[in-house]
């Protein structure tokens, strides 16, 4: 069975089951884009514009602010 590690996209810290995870207040309000990749914890390139943001991990590609809006 493969263990999949996950990382906090705002702090880059590895998420551990049973351990509380902190999220910065600005991120909780949706005012801060993720700066770390959820898959590997690497720092990402982030571009912010008036209508949203995008972030790019060198290993896992691009995500953007519209991803949460799609249904």
Image (spheres, grey):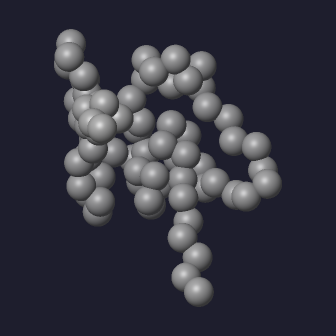
* Residue at x 27% of width, y 36% of height: 70
Please give left or right for residue 29 compared with residue 61 in the image: right
Q: Picture coordinates of residue 31 (x, y %)?
A: 43, 17
In the rendered image of this protein, does residue 61 appear above or below residue 29?
below
* Residue at x 23% of width, y 48% of height: 62
Please give left or right for residue 45 compared with residue 35 in the image: left
Q: Picture coordinates of residue 55 (x, y %)?
A: 28, 40
Q: Picture coordinates of residue 34 (x, y %)?
A: 41, 36
| Residue 58 in view (yes/no) | yes
Q: Picture coordinates of residue 44 (x, y %)?
A: 33, 45
In the rendered image of this protein, does residue 34 appear above or below residue 1?
above
* Residue at x 29% of width, y 52% of height: 57
In the rendered image of this protein, does residue 39 appear above or below residue 33?
below
* Residue at x 70% of width, y 57% of height: 16
**Camera-side residue: 10 or 63?**
63
Please give left or right for residue 4 compared with residue 47 in the image: right
- Quarter holding the N terminus? bottom right
């Amino acid at each position: 069975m493969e263990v999949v590690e996950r990382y906090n996209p705002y702090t880059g810290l590895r998420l551990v089951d049973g351990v509380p995870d902190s999220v910065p207040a600005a991120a909780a309000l949706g005012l801060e884009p993720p700066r770390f990749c959820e898959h590997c914890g690497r720092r990402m390139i982030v571009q912010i514009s008036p209508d949203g943001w995008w972030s790019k991990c060198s290993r896992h590609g691009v995500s953007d602010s519209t991803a949460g809006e799609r249904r």
